[in-house]
Image (cartoon, rainbow, N blue to C red):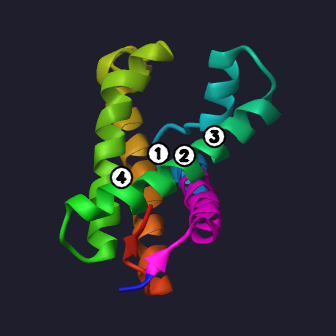
Amino acid sequence: MQEKNLMVAFPVGLAASGVMTVVMLLTPLVGLPEINIPRLLANWMGTSLSMGMLTYFLLGVGLSVFFATLFSRWLVAPAWLQGLLFGVVLWLFFMVMGSPLIGWGLFASNTGSPGGTLITSLLGHFSFGATLGFAYEKTGMRVWSM
């Protein structure tokens, strides 16, 4: 098995964050609410949109490293499936921990459209995880060494 390195994690995390952003900004086209995570982060941190965007993409890179170094070792499955499951884990974590922190309530219960917000968020996290899994699978590298 080949080893992955941080040179792979950085662009993959950026790409996955970019795909997630596009998905969550385009959901109004199918009648779902838009979620702009960089703007949410900026508002929550009380800073500029550019800082929210930087934070968002750095989180994406960090999660990419976490996926490759730890999560993918726990689960024996094709990388694309690992990615989708990672997306679900991230979504659940966000709905339980992140959503209340930004004022949405548990599982977005305090939003104008809780069901729509849940679906938009799930689609975004699915796309993030699927992009990670697909990209790592295409690199042919499956195991990271520390």
Between the residue at mark 2 and the residue at mark 1, the CA separation in whole angstroms equals: 5 Å
Say whether residue 7 is left or right of residue 70. Answer: right
> Which kind of residue does numbered mark 4 sit on?
Gly
Give me the C-alpha separation between circle 1 and circle 3. Answer: 25 Å
Mark 4, other Cα within 10 Å: few <14 / some 14–19 / many ≥20: many
Q: In this view, does 121 lie to the left or right of 52?
A: left
Total marks placed: 4
User: Which residue is identified by label 1?
Assistant: 31
**Residue identifier under label 3:** 56
- The mark lying in front, picked from 3 and 2, is 3
Q: In this view, does 146 lie above or below 50?
A: below
Which badge, 3 or 4, comes first in the chain's sequence?
3
**Image coords of residue 25 (percent x, y):** 60, 47
Query: What residue sits 65% from the left and 66% below the top?
Result: 11
> Around disc 2, counting alpha carbons within 10 Å, would you say few (fewer than 14), some (14 to 19), or many (20 or more)?
some
The question of residue 94 being in magenta is answered with no
